[in-house]
Amino acid sequence: MAVPDANPSTEHWPTGWHVRHVQETGSTNADLVELARAGAVHHSVIVADHQTAGRGRLDRKWEAPPGANLLVSILFKPSLFRPLHHFTHIVGLAARNASNNLFGVRPDLKWPNDLLIGDRKVAGILAQGGTDFVVVGIGVNVGWAPDGAARLGDQARGSNIELGPLDLLREMLAEVERLESLSNIELRALYESQLATIGRRVRVELANGVIVEGTAIGIDDEARLTVRLESGETISVDVGDVIHLRA
Ligand code: BT5
């Protein structure tokens, strides 16, 4: 499928970012993976007002009405080694910082790929790796959220309530750059220190469907979540859906 042409636009983006803003597409992640394979450069970005086939993990859907939310994918083609999951961390931390800078709302980071306000999801991240690139997509609920989820607009303080998805993206890109200047060790430490999941009681649905409960005590070098079960046994969770339980 052809990636849609960008709107002719006079939008200004930070130097070094190649941002393509489209009105509608299937999925910005699918588009950017296609462009990455065709040679798109580091820091290429696709942002859409609307997605007709927005994707979550495991073939789930990501929903948002036209124009309401931030729907964006960022291409990383790093020249120095970084583990792939670090790019998910960079984008998650950048979205959190940008929300705080613009809206005065600091969502919690939930392992592995969500941002929450209270117990409600306000953003989700989907990373897709290729041989020499990683595409990280994020949907942030700015003006709309489905039932049971949160949006920044509900929490925003002061005059910034009028700001929209593209303002959030501009702020996020600046934050991404700041985070990219950290070493792998610094980034891992920052992510772990900001991860609301650590210290929480969690219920985890493992990839094989088995459900376990315990306390999240850390992440390991591969960014797996370390959970201490009630039996005292410690497990590393690789893929799984995690629910924060009340204390
Ligand atoms: C995610 O998946 O949270 C990753 C979402 C990534 C979306 C971005 S948008 C730009 C880029 N292009 C794409 O096509 N995708 C990325 P997961 O953890 O699987 O969560 C998906 C689940 O969240 C769905 O099954 C719904 O239950 C719920 N959901 C759908 N839309 C939502 C929304 N706007 N806010 C909160 N929850 C939502």
Image (tube, helix red, strand yellow):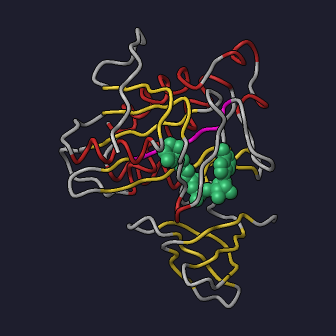
Q: In this view, does 176 lie to the left or right of 66?
A: left
Q: Nearer the viewer, residue 244 or 247?
A: 244
Q: Which of 3 and 212 is in front in this view?
A: 3
View extreme (top): residue: 10
Q: Is residue 141 magenta?
A: yes
Q: In this view, does 30 lie to the left or right of 107?
A: left
154 is higher (above) or lower (below) than 149: above
173 is higher (above) or lower (below) than 115: above
| Residue 91 percent across, percent down from the top left | 46, 42
The N terminus - image quarter:
top left
Q: In which quarter of the image is residue 75?
A: top left
208 is higher (above) or lower (below) than 139: below
Q: Quadrant of residue 3?
A: top left
| Residue 127 percent across, percent down from the top left | 42, 53
Q: Which of 81 and 209 is in front in this view?
A: 209
Which span is picked out in magenta?
A: 136-142
View extreme (front): residue: 1
Residue at 74 percent across and 25 percent down: it is: 156
The C terminus - image quarter:
bottom right
Q: Is residue 211 magenta?
A: no
Residue at 65 percent across and 74 percent down: it is: 204
Kindly report the secondary structure that dominates the magenta region of the rendered protein: strand
Q: Can I make out residue 193 in this image?
A: no
Q: Is residue 196 left or right of residue 6?
A: right
